[in-house]
Every structure is written in structure tokens, then in C-alpha cells.
Image: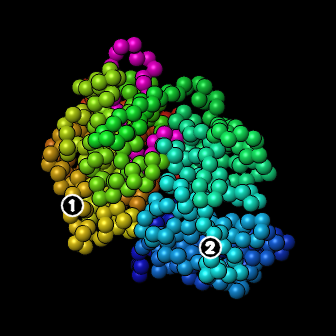
Amino acid sequence: MADDPGYRHLGDGYREGKLRRLHIYDVASGDILPVVTDSLDVRAAAWSPDGTHLVLSAKRRADLNRNLNTDLWLTGRDGQGLRLLTGNPGADDQPVWMADGRVAYLRATDPLWESAPRAVAILDPDMGEDGGLERRAEGFDNMVRRLAVMKERIFVTGANRGCLDVFEVLGNEVRPLTAGGHDFWSLRVSGGRLVMTGAGQTLPGAIFTLDVQATGEKPRTPDVLVDPNRQWRQRVGLVDPEPFRVEVDGRPIEGWYFRPPALDPGCRAPLVLSIHGGPEWMYGGYFLPEFHILPTYGYGVLIANPTGSSGYGYAFQNGVRGDWVGRPARELLACVDFAVARGWADSTALAVMGGSYGGHLAAALTTQTDRFKAAAVDRMFPDLVAFWGTTDEKWFPEWEFFGRPWEPRAREVYRRNSPTLLVDRVTTPTLISHGMEDYRCLIAGAEMWFSSLQALGVPSRFIRFLHEGHGIRDPRDQVFYQRQLLAFFDRHVLGLAVGDEAEDPGTDDETESFPRNE
């Protein structure tokens, strides 16, 4: 039973009216003190330097799943005197106390635009937003993700040509401290160093450190503190991709090619085009298993950042708004043409795959061309009107498609970008996969696409993962999926007579020690 759209959310499941509460645990007495009992969903909290106050980033119940608005609140350590600090309609989050007693945080002003510009804002907690804000990094023309403060110095992670780099905030501008090649997911301060978790195209995950007291103006590669996959990486041999650039309609598009390591010089390989999600996301510092598994079995993998990708400025990123299946599709097909012209790819052995928005666009490509011998679409939703109705975050389609489906400006945009209306054109054999706990893109989208392909007589297979959400996380499920993917491509791209790979994902001895995601 639900009385508002916040009843369900990816990662939280069915919340049934519950909110994230903040409590203080007294180690000495064992008492648990509720700090905030108002109708707030607490997202982040930070102690003041003297330990007497907490600043919170929280969302009102009325805003759950409707918009991105969060505000900052101040309370005493006993939970008394709760006071609103900000009234901005967008997201105010990641509060950090500065050495002078002020609070720095990330501030966006649009309640619907998920990847909107975010400035670093600084306020006096005694006066709040009404006392005036100091704004920094407003000149940064890319997405900001994380914030950290070292005394009076401010650092952020932000998108930069396919990667999440670390920057120091200098007034209204930023200075890059890292040299690309990674996505840094978290950012912390330890003495005179920054500590980050992150990944790279040949690095599944690691903990990094960066000495920010070192001299030098040039961006540099941070030190790897912990690499839990070092021996594994040395044993399996990962593929370093080759960068390339294609110009499409006057716009440069960056990409990378993962070449099969056993390919003889001068030979062409079957090619898999992989499309990233978002659409406001990017390839470049990102690790995916198929980038390395497929080349091991003779497939080249092509990735690129078409219009809509992050890290190339907001004009480039916002070009995808209302045009999910038009210009980005043309740009990616031009990248495939480039790979064929360079002698990398066999034009008669092409496949396409993607997840989330990438799955949506991969499906759309199969309505636009029959040049792909196979497709693999994961966690996609081909009917955007139904997507608006079922997704847990309504603001996302409302911003992407200029409103709600029935509104005059938006109605045609939803229709034009929905591949399901052109599904009768599809002849490409398609592997469809989806998690049954995905509340971002409900599994109904995969069921619609599979039902349509089956009705049309298009070879298709549907994999439903019982305990997966928006993406395949469980190691056993990943192994199972990669085997299914490879067998499907071998059968339909190469025409090989492969066996049925539909064994239970939990039967492989090598994955016996992995816990299930229950």
C-alpha cells in the first residue's frame, strides 16, 4: 500500500513509508539517541569540529522520487533545535565543515536535472543561505561528483574526457590534479594526502593516494595503495585499448578499441560495439569484464562517447536531451564505419550491446539497421511512456523528454524515442537480460521487447536474474551472463554450432565461494 511515489527505490526495495533516520550511539552507555524525528530522509551528516552540532543533507518525504531536491539542516548533538539552512529547489548535498567553522557543500539549482552543473557553495551555519553564499567552481563546464576539504583547500572529482578526475577548486575555476585514465568514485582527506577508490580500463578497482602537498603544476597519476586484483590481472592478461577519434557532422567523437590479443597482423576481427549507459555517462576510465573477455575469444570491442556523454562540456552533454536515438546512433555507426575502414573490423561480423540507456540505444539501432548480426540488451526500457510510469525516479524522464508524457511539448518526444513503436523492423537476434529487483528500469521493459521479438519470429533469449537490480553484480550471475553472451555471439555472429549454455549460474566450482546477493 502506498500514498506517495516514494514507496519503492532502487537499492532500498519497497520502503513502505520508512525514511532513513539518523541516530547517535553512545558507546559508554549503549544508548541510541534519535537525532532527527521530523519527516526527513537523511542522506548525509557531518559533525562540527567541536562536536556540538551536526549538519545534515536530507530530503522531505513529499519530494521522494519526485525530484532531486535535498536541503541542509543544522541540529544540536541531542537532536534539538533542528533548523533549515538552505531552501534551494535543487540538490544541496555532501556537507563538509571547514576549519573556519563554515560549511562547504555541492549545490545544484535544477530539481529535475540529474547531471546538472554543481557549484561548491560555502555558508555560515549561524545564518544559513539567507546570510549569503560564497560560490566556487562555477566556471567548471562538466559534472562534479564528490567533494573534500583539507583545511581551507577544496577538492572535487569531476568528469573529464571520459574519466572522473580529481581537481582542486581555485576560486571560480578548477585545476586538474590527476591525468585521466581512471574513474575515482570516492574522495577523502588523510593528512596531506587525498585517498580515493577508483578503477581504470584495465583495473577493476583499487585504493589510491595523491600527495597534494607535492610541488608541480602538471596532472599526475596517483599512487596505488591497495590493488586487490594485482595477481589476478597479471595472470589473466587484460587488454590495453587503442584510442581513436572520429568527426561526425563537425563534432569530434572519442573512442577506444580493444583488439583481440591473438589476432594475426593484418587480419580483421568480428566487432562488438558496446554502448554506455546514462546517457549522461562516459567510457574512458571504466572497467567492464566484457572489454577483456570478448577479445580473449577473438572479438574486438569498440567503445565511444557519443553526444550526451559526460566530460566534454555541457553543450555536448545536453545535445542528447530529447534525442536519445538520433544523433548518438549516427555517431556510433560512424565509429563502426571507422573501425571497418581502419581494417580492425569484419563488416560481415558485427554485434552491438549495452546496458540501461546503452541497452535502449542498442535496441533502437536494431530498428534502424540490419548490419548487426546479434544484439545484447541489458536493463533497457523500450517504451518511454511506460518507463515514466514505472521508474522510481520520475525527474529523470521528465527532464530528458521535456515533461510528463501527456504534456504537449513532451508527448512527441516520448514517442519519437521509444524503439517499441518500430520493433516490427527488427530482424537482429537479440539476447535480453534484466534484474527482477531493478526499480530504475522495471523488468516489464525487457518482457515487452522479448514478447515482441518472439511474436515477430526474431531469434531471442530472455535471462531474468532473480536478485539483481540495475546491473549484474553477483559474481555467479556475472559468470553465467558472460557465458551466455559469448555463446549467443558465437552462434549468431560467427555461425558456430555452439551448445546450450543455460546451466544454473551457481554450478561452477570456481564461483562456489562467492556469496549470493540475498
Q: Is residue 157 above or below residue 217?
A: below
Q: In this picture, is 234 found above or below 223?
A: above
Image-based side of 440 in relation to 514, left or right? left
Label 1 is placed on what type of residue? Arg
Q: Is residue 447 visible?
A: no
Main secondary structure found in the magenta portion:
loop
As drawn, is 140 to the left or to the right of 493?
A: right
Task: Give the structural element (helix, strand or loop) at label 1.
Answer: helix
Residue located 49% across and 75% down the image: 89
Q: Nearer the viewer, residue 215 or 206?
A: 215
Choose top left, top right, bottom left or bottom right for residue 254. Answer: top left
Is 277 one of the magenta-colored residues?
A: yes
Please identify the quadrant where the N terminus is shown. Answer: bottom left
The crowd level at tag 2 (other Cα within 10 Å; few <14, some 14-19, many 20+) is some
Horizontal and vertical percent position of residue 152: 74, 60
Tell me the residue at 64%/44% (across/down). Answer: 177
Q: Element type at marker 2?
A: loop
Query: Compared with residue 230, is residue 113 higher up or lower down, i.e. above or below?
Result: below
In terms of depth relative to the viewer, which is nearer, 194 or 270? 194
> Within the image, what quadrant is residue 457 found in?
top left
Extreme residue in the right direction: 28
- Between marks 1 and 2, how big is the CA–CA gap? 42 Å
Going by the numbered disc 2, the residue's amino acid type is: Leu
Residue 13 screen position, x and y as percent: 48, 65
On residue 133, the disc is 2
Which mark is drawn over residue 415? 1
Q: Position of residue 243 (x, y in %)?
A: 45, 30
The verdict on residue 517 being magenta is no
In this picture, which residue range is highlighted in magenta?
Answer: 258-287
Q: Are marks 1 and 2 in contact (CB under 8 Å)?
A: no
Nearer the camera: disc 1 or disc 2: 2
N-terminal of the pair, mark 1 or mark 2, is 2
